[in-house]
């Protein structure tokens, strides 16, 4: 065994890769190489350990692991591999994870080259002064063109890629070169272990026995068991009961964590809300003067009502949300009541993917059947009496006569795309009420199109629309930049003359008409014929702007019921009863769950 | 109250392309063995039946066997004894033999008196044969004759059904069953591209048939059944009134001593077994749901007090009536029944009332 010098032999790094380019596979190979995990114990893609993450091939939460590596120079190194989430919804979390590292491995698929999402994160890494170590993966594929990939890295990103290792993570080819490159290129952490404590929180999760486990990167100073710590943003204080490192199979406790090291702290913390990602941990009795830069309070941007399909499951839904929130501070919820849907919750999410994931986890892990309402952003309304209200639920939208000024949140969006699709992407952005800012050619084939767009135009299906207009090549990245005045209206949907509160939404006046038509059509398609004719109307402030009619059912009968065989009739009745359970009775109209879901997908 | 007896005769010369009742190809030897099995099974029931119904299949094919079976059935004096028959298999010989053996009701599968419609249904007979069969039965002494007709078949219109019923009205019939065609899974019709009248037309045909039959004194008493007063099929009424009956033969259903059970659709098994093997239906028989869904098939409708007596929540049922448009039902505080328009959507109405 060689020497492991502190801090010279520590390497803190993350992996940046496009979906499918092999991030998790490479991480697994590295784990194998360092003998942290024996081959037989390998579960495919160890780092993404949520079922949903594996299925979708995306990382939802950051994760970290500490590895030991004996390099060719004979020295032992400590590798801290920090996995990062891979979606624009989690941009802030990505930036905090990157901030915990000195280097980033950039995986580029040898046949596909650099993809836009990778680029966004690579720029983020370069901005934070990380050393980027390019790796060319999937060289085992017949279509692999490693030299072209290297050239692309040099021309697009502007970093040397000549000696980038060419590997196959899948087949385990040349992984050692990656390890050596990390040793050689990623600088050891800086920071003074004797300075006042400053540790960056980059993740946290709830453990039933130890309370919240906080993942930190110590930037300055040292933290020991028994220390009284303070979270500089939330001002919460705790006593450290345990700290240590994240091993591949669990926590390994230690006595102290010093500047440059990555590890965890447990301090009998009850609420994950006290441990915000990006916050700085310091000592309560000897605090740092300034927190680390870059902390941001993360606010939910997209809101939607979540209701149990079966009203009696309200308590189960609350329990499930409580449990999910333990590990996900960015999820917010509070009870709300809908005339149409009964008791449920208004939930806030970072973005649509986050919303999707929460819904799917509720349904899958907690076995709940849900009805969700159309996602809404937060609008700022100045009333004629001078009051300013934030509206995240169309139900609370004030009457037009009370509104002096309506404003909606705006984002600054960068769309990365091959130049072939510029025309259709700009068309899409124009259609989504975007304001063109500028466009940069990153090379002769790739562009960065910069737009300012209303958030409510991108929360529904912008990503899908972008993908379909660019054959899947374009991706985007956005941040909220503030509010802008807007011509907003509240659109109500009426079934048989009654407003269905759960179907109301806020929309730009110019979009109201086509949306109203689409929504009435969708409802007509998805609500089965009833015993009477049902008008489906969309209205703004009492004025009907679209109408469809669900014709009355005429024939639903079992004509032949004799020979004593009544089983078929009985089965039919049972089926109908079961079907009724899945229906919401709105006045005299039975509305199936699918109808509520269908209006969420207006553009399909 | 006496029970009914249903005997399934699962033999046909050929299978109609829309039919999903259980039947096999007729053969003389199997028919003989089948008769013996039926007689064996009859020994299990120490009952005096007041209705006997031979359904099929094409029961009239086994007229000799039926005559023999009848000798082994003990019956009330005024029992109703029905045999189903096809126009093309019925003649003076077999009909008069059946009459002599005690059969007092014949139900003919006529389906239509329009030859094009009959052809499109894949039937073996034409209108002329059908008319002749009814006349023969009448001449053999039957005064309780029923005809099945089918609504919503290929090529049919309100007009063509009207003329079928017109012609039927000239025959000595006192009962008509008018079934709307339903395409059953696993029948040849389910695999064929049919040119059926649309739903609206079928509804119009049905409503017009109900009215026309009423006008000639054949009143509706069930969704698909019509009769002169007093000639309603007593046997079939047992099904809809939740009364008990014994079923013998493969695919036959029974409601006997408060239990519902059925026999597998397998003739060999039935013939070879000493007594037919039955499977119990898991649901509780005779409950309020069953009562409501069966009685709402009848123009007589259901009685709220009886529904409550069987454990139903009468108040809830009454409340749910507010969800149903007025023209679909009549209710006087105790008796609830559906109108012909209501019958057409009776599945939905019953579903709404009972969930």
Image (tube, helix red, strand yellow):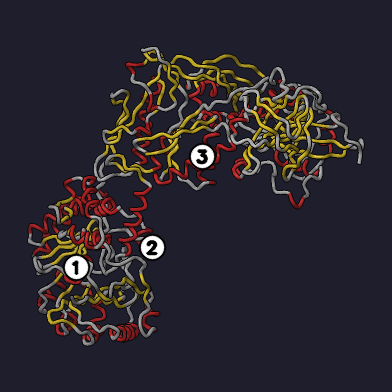
Crowd tier of the residue under label 3, counting other residues whose Cα lies within 10 Å: few below 14, some 14–19, many 20 or above? many
The residue beneath circle 2 is B186
The image quadrant of residue B172 is bottom left
For residue B258, above or below residue A10: below
Confirm whether residue B38 shows in the render: yes
SS for dot 1: helix
The mark nearer the N terminus, 2 or 1, is 2
Q: Nearer the viewer, mark 1 or mark 3?
A: 3
Q: Nearer the viewer, mark 2 or mark 1?
A: 1
- Between the C-alphas of marks 2 and 1, the distance is 29 Å
Query: Could you say where residue A495 lies in the image, as x and y percent from the top left?
Result: 30, 35
Q: Which mark is residue A321?
A: 3
Q: Nearer the viewer, mark 2 or mark 3?
A: 3
SS for dot 3: helix
Q: Chain of mark 1?
A: B
Answer whether labels 2 and 3 touch (C-beta < 8 Å): no
Crowd tier of the residue under label 1, counting other residues whose Cα lies within 10 Å: few below 14, some 14–19, many 20 or above? some
For residue A27, above or below residue A539: below
The image quadrant of residue A161 is top right
For residue B292, above or below residue A109: below
The residue beneath circle 1 is B237
Answer whether labels 2 and 1 touch (C-beta < 8 Å): no
Q: Chain of mark 2?
A: B
Crowd tier of the residue under label 2, counting other residues whose Cα lies within 10 Å: few below 14, some 14–19, many 20 or above? few
Quadrant (top left/top right/bottom left/bottom right) for the N terminus of chain B? bottom left
Asked if marks 2 and 3 fall on the same chain, the answer is no
Q: Which mark is residue A505?
A: none
Depth check, front residue: B170 or A397: A397
Asked if marks 2 and 1 fall on the same chain, the answer is yes
- Between the C-alphas of marks 1 and 3, the distance is 55 Å
Q: Chain of mark 3?
A: A
């Amino acid at each position: 065994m060689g020497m492991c010098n502190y801090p010279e032999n520590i390497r803190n790094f993350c992996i940046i890769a496009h979906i499918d380019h092999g991030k998790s596979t490479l991480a697994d190979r590295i784990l194998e190489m360092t003998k942290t995990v024996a081959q037989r114990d390998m579960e495919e893609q160890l780092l993404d350990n949520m079922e949903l993450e594996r299925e979708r091939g995306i990382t939802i939460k950051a994760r970290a692991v500490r590895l030991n590596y004996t390099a060719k120079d004979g020295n032992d190194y400590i590798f801290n591999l920090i996995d990062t989430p891979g979606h624009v919804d989690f941009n802030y979390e990505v930036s905090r994870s990157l901030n915990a590292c000195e280097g980033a491995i950039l995986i580029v698929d040898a046949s596909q080259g650099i993809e836009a999402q990778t680029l966004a994160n690579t720029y983020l890494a370069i901005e934070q002064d990380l050393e980027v170590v390019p790796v060319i993966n999937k060289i085992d594929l017949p279509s692999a063109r490693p030299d072209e990939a290297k050239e692309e890295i040099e021309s697009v990103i502007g970093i040397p890629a000549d000696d980038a290792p060419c590997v196959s993570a899948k087949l385990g080819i040349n992984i050692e070169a990656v390890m050596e490159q990390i040793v050689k290129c990623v600088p050891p952490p800086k920071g003074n272990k004797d300075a006042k404590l400053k540790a960056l929180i980059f993740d946290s999760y709830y453990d039933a026995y130890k309370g919240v486990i906080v993942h930190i990167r110590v930037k300055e100073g040292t933290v020991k068991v028994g220390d009284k710590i303070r979270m500089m943003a939330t001002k919460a204080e705790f006593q450290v009961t345990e700290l240590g490192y994240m091993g591949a199979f669990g926590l390994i406790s230690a006595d102290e964590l010093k500047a440059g090291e990555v590890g965890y702290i447990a301090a009998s913390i009850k609420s994950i809300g006290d441990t915000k990602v990006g916050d700085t941990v310091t000592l309560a009795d000897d605090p740092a003067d300034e927190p680390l830069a870059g902390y941001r309070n993360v606010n939910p941007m997209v809101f939607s009502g979540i209701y149990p399909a079966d009203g009696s499951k309200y308590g189960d839904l609350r329990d499930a949300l409580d449990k999910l929130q333990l590990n996900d501070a960015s999820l917010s919820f509070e009870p709300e009541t809908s005339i149409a849907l009964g008791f449920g919750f208004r939930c806030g999410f970072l973005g649509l993917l986050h919303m999707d994931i929460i819904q799917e986890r509720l349904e899958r892990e907690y076995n709940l059947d849900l009805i969700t309402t159309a996602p809404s952003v937060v609008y700022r309304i100045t009333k004629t009496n001078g009051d300013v209200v934030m509206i995240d639920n169309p139900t609370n939208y004030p009457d037009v006569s009370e509104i002096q000024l309506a404003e909606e949140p705006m984002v600054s969006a960068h769309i990365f795309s091959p130049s072939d699709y510029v025309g259709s992407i700009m068309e899409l952005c124009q259609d989504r009420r975007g304001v063109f800012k500028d466009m940069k050619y990153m090379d002769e084939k790739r562009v960065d199109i910069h737009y300012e767009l209303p958030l409510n135009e991108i929360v529904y299906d912008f990503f899908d629309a972008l993908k379909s207009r660019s054959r899947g090549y374009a991706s985007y990245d956005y941040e909220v930049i503030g509010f802008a005045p807007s011509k907003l209206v509240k659109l109500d949907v009426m079934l048989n003359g009654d407003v269905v509160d759960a179907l109301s939404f806020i929309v730009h006046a110019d979009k109201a008409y086509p949306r109203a038509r689409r929504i009435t059509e969708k409802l007509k398609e998805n609500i089965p014929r009833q015993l009477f004719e049902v008008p489906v109307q969309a209205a703004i402030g009492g004025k009907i702007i679209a109408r469809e009619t669900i014709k009355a059912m005429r024939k639903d009968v079992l004509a032949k019921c004799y020979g004593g065989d009544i089983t078929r009739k009985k089965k039919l009745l049972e089926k109908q009863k079961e079907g009724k359970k899945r229906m919401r009775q709105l006045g005299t109209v039975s509305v199936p769950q699918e109808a509520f879901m269908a209006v969420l997908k207006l553009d399909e | 109250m006496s029970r009914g007896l249903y005997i399934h005769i699962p033999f046909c010369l050929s299978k109609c392309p829309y039919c999903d009742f259980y039947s096999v190809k007729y053969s003389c030897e199997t028919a003989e063995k089948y008769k013996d099995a039926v007689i064996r099974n009859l020994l299990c029931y120490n009952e005096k039946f007041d209705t006997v119904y031979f359904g099929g299949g094409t029961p009239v094919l086994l007229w000799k066997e039926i005559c023999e079976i009848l000798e082994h059935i003990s019956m009330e004096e005024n029992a109703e004894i029905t045999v189903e028959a096809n126009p093309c298999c019925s003649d003076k010989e077999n009909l008069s033999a059946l009459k002599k053996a005690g059969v007092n009701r014949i139900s003919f599968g006529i389906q239509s008196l329009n030859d094009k419609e009959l052809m499109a249904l894949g039937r073996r007979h034409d209108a002329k044969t059908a008319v002749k069969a009814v006349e023969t039965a009448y001449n053999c002494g039957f005064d309780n004759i029923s005809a099945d007709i089918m609504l919503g078949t290929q090529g049919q219109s309100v007009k063509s059904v009207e003329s079928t019923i017109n012609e039927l009205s000239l025959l000595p019939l006192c009962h008509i069953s008018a079934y709307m065609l339903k395409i059953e899974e696993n029948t040849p019709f389910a695999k064929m591209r049919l040119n059926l009248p649309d739903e609206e037309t079928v509804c119009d045909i049905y409503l017009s048939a109900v009215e026309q039959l009423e006008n000639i004194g054949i009143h509706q008493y069930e969704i698909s059944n019509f009769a002169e007063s007093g000639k309603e099929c007593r046997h079939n009424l047992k099904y809809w009134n939740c009364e008990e009956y014994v079923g013998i033969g493969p695919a036959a259903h029974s409601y006997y001593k408060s239990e519902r059970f059925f026999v597998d659709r397998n003739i060999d098994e039935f013939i070879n077994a000493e007594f037919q093997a039955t499977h119990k239906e898991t649901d509780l028989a005779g409950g309020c749901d069953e009562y409501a869904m069966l009685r709402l098939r009848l123009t007589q409708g259901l009685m709220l007090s009886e529904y409550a007596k069987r454990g139903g929540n009468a108040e809830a049922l009454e409340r749910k009536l507010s969800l149903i448009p007025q023209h679909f039902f009549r209710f006087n505080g105790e008796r609830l029944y559906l109108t012909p328009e209501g019958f057409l959507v009776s599945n939905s109405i019953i579903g709404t009332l009972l969930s």
